[in-house]
Amino acid sequence: MSNFLPILSDFTTITLQEMDGVKLMSRMDTKFVFKIEKLPSLLEKMTPFYRVLEINGKIIHDYKSLYFDTNARKFYIDHHNSRVNRNKIRFREYVDSGLTFLEVKLKNNKGKTIKKRMKVDAISKELSKEQKVYIENIIGKSVDVTAKQWINFSRITLVHKSKKERLTIDINLTFKNNEKEGNLNDIVIAEVKQERMSRSSDFIRIAKEMSILPIRLSKYCISTMELWPNIKQNRFKKKLLFINKLKQA
C-alpha cells in the first residue's frame, strides 16, 4: 500500500460535508477491476482532475458490511440470472465516519442503482421489527432474510473537481461466513458513480489509456461464489476466470 500513499497526498482534499452535493443515491455505476500494481500510475494521472475525501486526517477509510439474503439466495440468483429490479440488503459501517446504516439497494430496469438507507446504532446479525418493516416498504413485499456473509474493505473516495462524479477505489477486500473466509487483496475494484452515464469521465478515459476496461462485477456475488462454491454460477464463469487470472498474474 505504501507505494501509492505519497501520490494520494498530492491530491486536493474534500470534506464529508463538502461531498453532500455528490451523494448520488440514484446513479449509474461503471466498475473496473485491475491489479493493485497499476494503482500508483493511475492515481498520478488522476491528480489534476479529482479531490480525495479526508476524514479525521485519513484518506483511506475502512468499511464493514454484513449482507442478508433468503435461504434460497434470491438476491444472488436474481443477479446471476440478470433480473432487473433486483435488490441487495446489508448493514454497512463507515468506520472512520462513525456511522452505520441499514441499506437497501435496487438495480432497476434502466440500469440505475438506487440506494435507500436508515441510520442504526450498530451492525446486527438480526433484523429488528422496525428494520423489517423498513425493508418491506422499500421492496414492496415481505422477505425472510438472514445474515449470510461479511465483506470488509478499505476505500479511497475521489470527487471530480468540476463534474458531478464520484469515484470509489476499493482495496484490501476480505470476506467470510461462519465456515470459510477469503480475500482479493491483490486486486482493486474501482467504481465510477454518475447521475447519468457519460464516457467523458476523466477516470474512464485514463483507465482506457491504461488498458483497464469496464466489467460488471459484484463484490457480493464474487464473494458468494468463493464462500459457497457449489452455488449456481455458470453465467459468472467468465468473470471468475478473469478474477482468477488477475490473482495469478
Image (cartoon, helix red, strand yellow):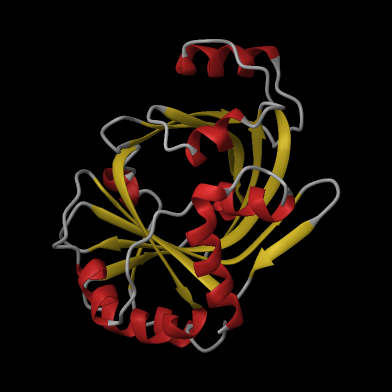
Residue 43 as seen in the image, left or right of residue 120: left
Q: Position of residue 246 (x, y in %)?
A: 53, 76
Q: Position of residue 150 (x, y in %)?
A: 70, 47
Q: Residue at x 73, y 62 (%)?
A: 182
Name the quadrant of the N terminus.
bottom right
Q: Residue at x 86, y 50 (%)?
A: 179
Residue 118 as seen in the image, left or right of residue 18: right
From where the camera sits, is residue 58 visible?
no
Q: Is residue 9 above or below residue 128?
A: below
Q: Residue at x 65, y 48 (%)?
A: 224
Q: Quadrant of residue 84?
A: top left
Residue 4 as seen in the image, left or right of residue 51: right
Q: Residue at x 71, y 18 (%)?
A: 128
Considering every residue shown, the one lying at the far front of the view is 234
Name the quadrant of the C terminus.
bottom right
Q: Is residue 233 above or below residue 78?
A: below
Q: Nearer the viewer, residue 181 or 41?
A: 181
Q: Quadrant of residue 40?
A: bottom left
Residue 186 as seen in the image, left or right of residue 192: right
Q: Position of residue 243 (x, y in %)?
A: 54, 68
Q: Position of residue 215 (x, y in %)?
A: 38, 60
